[in-house]
Image (cartoon, rainbow, N blue to C red):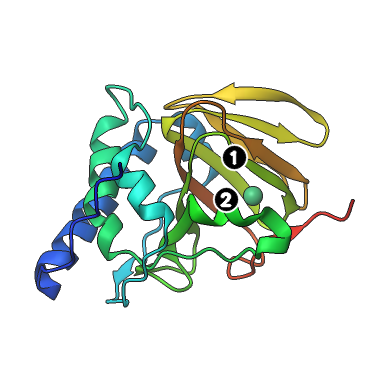
């Protein structure tokens, strides 16, 4: 039985405060991890813009079970859960690409980037969630990417690199157009993901077989 996500009854100022707190938690997360700091500096040009919330079926799964956090990742996990009902969630992929079950238990939103919730031209920082026992098929994109695991675990695959099972606080780098994929096992996974370089507003594309 899934717990319903809290209904968005807060006024816009309260929602803004939740997003500002989540951004601060993400900044602390970034500041506390040398790999993240080396990947890219924290953006200096962040501006909050109100965006219409958009919910996806995966949100209820996230609220019900975001996966286990570590002592260090708990603050960010909680801050993401606080904004989750108000975020502009997206699915992007089609059922042909990822399957129907995937679309029921997956979702992502842009915390900061070309479209907001915080506008910046310097990076794209997204939150991604996958339920347990899902396969995220091989895909690629031009921007370089650093995955950070906030809660739960996932088995990360990338062409030219060994598979790695990653948990809270661990990271995975994908270079430009390096095909990659992910499998969740018996737990979901919640991630904060950075992009840098050209094509920040472009969607990933499935890698040709
Ligand atoms: Zn990627």
Q: Is residue 38 left or right of residue 77?
A: right
Is 37 above or below relative to 54?
above
Q: Is residue 113 left or right of residue 32?
A: right
The one of 24 and 8 positioned closer to us in this rendering? 8
Residue 191 x, y percent position in the rendering = 46, 41
Residue at the far right in the pictured view: 209
Disc sitting over residue 101 in the figure: 2
Q: Quadrant of the N terminus?
A: top left
Residue 192 x, y percent position in the rendering = 44, 45
Is 152 above or below relative to 45?
above
The residue under the point 77% across, 52% down is 177
The one of 31 and 141 positioned closer to us in this rendering? 141
Does residue 149 appear in the picture of this structure? yes
Crowding at mark 2 (Cα within 10 Å: few <14, some 14-19, many 20+): some
What number of labels is visible? 2
The residue under the point 45% across, 48% down is 41
Disc sitting over residue 134 in the figure: 1
Is 132 above or below relative to 48?
above
Q: Is residue 41 left or right of residue 9?
A: right
The residue under the point 53% across, 63% down is 91
Q: Real-space Cα distance between discs 1 and 2?
A: 8 Å
N-term-proximal mark, 1 vs 2: 2
Residue at the far front in the pictured view: 1
Residue 33 x, y percent position in the rendering = 42, 30
The residue under the point 11% across, 69% down is 9
Residue 66 x, y percent position in the rendering = 35, 37
- Whether residues under marks 1 and 2 lie with C-beta atoms below 8 angstroms apart, the answer is yes
């Amino acid at each position: 039985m899934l717990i319903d996500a809290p209904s968005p009854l807060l006024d816009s100022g309260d929602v803004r405060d939740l997003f500002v707190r989540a951004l601060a938690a993400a900044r602390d997360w970034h500041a506390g991890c040398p790999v993240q700091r080396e990947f890219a500096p924290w953006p200096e040009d962040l501006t909050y813009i109100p965006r219409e919330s958009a919910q996806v079926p995966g949100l209820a799964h996230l609220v019900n079970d975001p996966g286990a956090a570590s002592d260090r990742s708990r603050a960010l996990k909680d801050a993401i859960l606080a904004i989750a009902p108000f975020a502009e969630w997206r699915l992007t992929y089609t059922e042909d690409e990822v399957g129907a079950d995937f679309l029921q238990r997956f979702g992502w939103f842009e915390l900061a980037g070309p479209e907001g919730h915080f506008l910046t031209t310097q990076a794209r920082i997204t939150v991604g969630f996958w339920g347990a026992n899902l396969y995220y098929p091989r895909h690629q994109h031009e921007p370089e990417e650093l995955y950070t695991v906030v809660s739960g675990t996932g088995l990360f695959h990338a062409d030219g690199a060994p598979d790695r099972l990653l948990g809270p606080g661990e990271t995975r780098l994908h270079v430009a157009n390096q095909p990659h994929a992910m499998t969740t096992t018996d737990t979901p996974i919640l991630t904060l993901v950075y992009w840098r370089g050209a094509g920040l507003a472009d969607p990933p594309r499935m890698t040709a077989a």
